[in-house]
Image (cartoon, helix red, strand yellow):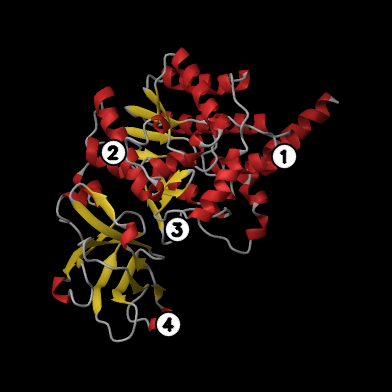
Amino acid sequence: MLKLSLRIIILIVLVVFGLQQTDSIFYKDHFYRDTINQYQKSDKDFDIVFFGNSHSHSSFDPRIFELELDAKAINLGSPSQRLVITKVVIDMVLKNKKPDLAVVNIFSLSLNESNNERYKTFQLEALDFLPLTWSKANTIFEMFPVSEWPTAFSKTLRYHFNWDDISSVSKPYEYPGNYDTHLGFSTYKTSYDDKSYSKFEKKFGDRDVEVTSLNSLEKKRIDDIIKIFKDNDVPVLFVNAPDAAYDISDNFKTYAIQIGKYLNSKGQNILDFNLIKDSLGLTRTDYRDPNHLNTKGAIKTSKYLAGYISKQYDLNGAISKEELKKNRYYLAKNDFENTIKSVSLEANDSIVQGLKKIHLYHAGNNKMEFLFEIDTTSFKDVKLTTQYGTSPNLPINKKERSWPTISKKDVIHYNDSSFLVITLYAKQREVFDLKVTINGDGYPTLFENEQLKL
């Protein structure tokens, strides 16, 4: 019987190893794959690294910390990431280079480990794109029964229905046009409406069970995070990002209070943004949905956190000017110097009221952005057409086209600049005949660029 069991285990190990060799060409398209790819391609020498779930990746924008602290930063948060998975991500980072500061977002869902298929699927979304290490393997051993190990380890099995669509794992992820990303920071530029808030209010208003203490597993998960940073001599700051549920759900709020008490008992700092969000000037327009900040809310939260970090921690890094050229807030602060091309539209003010200039810059990877400088007193919403080709002289029907609207409600204010953003995620690393026009017949081209290598 013992020999049979050993043979089964050896067979499972061989199957898992064999499948791992083909996993790089079968994958589920997901933005966290893009985040991990960016991390793996970097020099990994980051001053600040953010960890946690969607509250982390929606709230803390590395561009702000680059500009405010002269620091290299990356956000390794992923949707629904629990602390048990966060530990694997931390292990990956600390095996490479040690940051000056780790920031870990933590709240009730960080500790929720309900043993159902939906929960396990959430965790695999993060684990799938992490390199195979003992920490990753041990977590899968803990979460899944032996019979599920091959599937849990292997994307080749799990995504077998995609086998007709074999693609390289390095292929850039195609983000939606209204998504805002930078080195793992990922959120929408939009805000939510009254109908969305009503559904949210009912959902969280029913969660009225107060939490009076953390259980032993929850404490262990927190202790494990504290220990791994302590063993590696890396300072850690725990944070709780702004969330409207804090004001509605007794469960959400009391959970946060108990997490804070436990961390304080362990000599750890926690900055709960829900206690100070009014002083940050956050309003409904700063959230993409009631649980998550949008671009504007992330600016406010990140600027506050950058100021807090500058007073409490010592950072040793200095980000290069080449990296800063990919940072829209750096460009705005420096009068949009170092952009690829700028076009003044003030002479066309009768056509585009309040639209002053358009700037094009390469925002890293396969991403390019148009920054529209505006006069907020006179600007009115306008629908545009963007188009480009993936090879020279393509007919219009073969070009990549989109019809974004630049709207006053989406204006970004940073220091003394007010501007709107259109992001294009190019399908090739070289684009041709890039144009921006007002949507409609007879309108002139506002911006054009013959060739651009990303």
Q: From the viewer's perspective, is residue 397 above or below residue 210?
A: below
Outermost right residue:
1
**Residue 61 in which image quadrant:** top left
The answer to whether residue 207 of the structure is visible from this angle is yes
Q: Earlier in the sequence, mark 3 or mark 2?
A: 3
- Figure quadrant of the N terminus: top right
Q: Secondary structure at mark 2?
A: helix
Give me the C-alpha separation between circle 3 and circle 2: 25 Å
**Residue 109 in which image quadrant:** top right
Q: Secondary structure at mark 4?
A: helix
Amino acid type of the residue that numbered disc 4 sits on in the rendered structure: Asn
Give me the C-alpha separation between circle 4 and circle 3: 22 Å
Q: Which mark is residue 397?
A: 4
The answer to whether residue 77 of the structure is visible from this angle is no
Residue that numbered label 2 is attached to? 303
Q: Is residue 83 left or right of residue 380?
A: right
**Residue 275 in which image quadrant:** top left
Task: Please report contact status of discs 1 and 3: CB closer than 8 Å, yes or no.
Answer: no
x, y (%) of residue 13? 68, 36
Give me the C-alpha separation between circle 4 and circle 2: 43 Å
Residue that numbered label 3 is attached to? 175
Amino acid type of the residue that numbered disc 3 sits on in the rendered structure: Tyr
Can you tell which of label 3 and label 2 is closer to the viewer?
2
Residue at (38, 53) in percent of width and height: 180
Residue that numbered label 1 is attached to? 148
Task: Please report contact status of discs 4 and 2: CB closer than 8 Å, yes or no.
Answer: no
Can you tell which of label 1 and label 3 is closer to the viewer?
3
Amino acid type of the residue that numbered disc 2 sits on in the rendered structure: Lys
Can you tell which of label 4 and label 1 is closer to the viewer?
4
Residue at (26, 71) in percent of width and height: 451
